[in-house]
Image: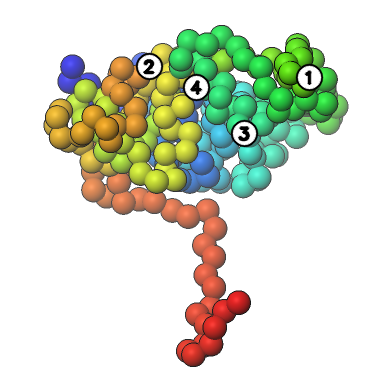
Amino acid sequence: MNKVSTGAAEAVADIPDGASLAVGGFGLSGVPEVLVRALYAHGADGLKVVSNNCGVDGRGLGVLLAAGRIARVTGSYVGENKEFARQYLAGELEVELVPQGTLAERLRAGGAGIPAFYTPAGVGTQVERGGLPWRYTAEGTVELASPAKETREFAGRRHVLEHGITTDFALVRAWRGDRHGNLVFRKSAANFNPLAAMAGRVTVAEVEELVEPGELRPDEVHLPGIFVQRVVALTAEEAADKQLERLSISASPTRGTVRT
């Protein structure tokens, strides 16, 4: 039951070329940065990534992307990564864009053993009809497009069939975790992490604070250890290495004034 690895390098050492990965995080919040960099050092190539977004230039999954290690991305948001846009439009990267809530449910469904489900999200759009560009040619024409999806009516409203997602591996980050793999996430850093962890056949979790079994109360555990196969304890420096995508600072109001 002791799932703690000696380090990030050991935890990702068996991820092969062409593996599929579910990766937690939203922007730079809750990103398993240490595991991503260990995977970069490991050298795995041709990866198929499922994640809300693909990091930013130089951080998160952006590190693997810039090295040309990612072949396909299933995600919801791509707006913070210029290299992502360049590779996609140049025909170097296959991209499946999914409505954000649908992506979350596809990961959860896969982890729960649910093969497919119906949702109203995307009805009447290219999500339903097909034709979303998945891959371009170098000349800018569409080489591969999304297929049309099955629909069915429930209570007078049309719904689209979506399939659950499972992946070979999952990389996630948690605030606290024990040696059995039980995880606790902190505030917005939870985001896609529990869902990604559920979808992976082999899930690796980096934790900011490793505790002994029994120290986490059952009612505070967000993800039970049944979904986690490997745990990596971060150093204090690694746990503190958190960056903001965009820092916004507003001027303090003049003393004695009231904001409306």
- Residue at 35% x, 50% y is 241
Secondary structure beneath dot 1 equals loop
Q: Earlier in the sequence, mark 3 or mark 4?
A: 3
Element under label 4?
helix
Q: Which residue sits at x=15%, y=34%?
A: 215
Q: How many marks?
A: 4
Q: Circle 1 is placed at which residue position?
A: 156
Residue at the spot of label 2: 202
Q: Looking at the picture, which amino acid does disc 2 mark?
A: Val
Quadrant of res 151? top right
The residue lying toward the viewer, choosing from 64 and 79, is 79
Q: Rounded to the nearest whole Å, what is the CA distance between mark 1 and mark 2?
A: 40 Å
Q: Quadrant of the N terminus?
A: top left
Q: Earlier along the polypeptide chain: callout 1 or callout 4?
A: 4
Q: In the image, what residue type sits under mark 1?
A: Gly
For marks 3 and 2 on the same chain, the one whose residue lies earlier in the sequence: 3
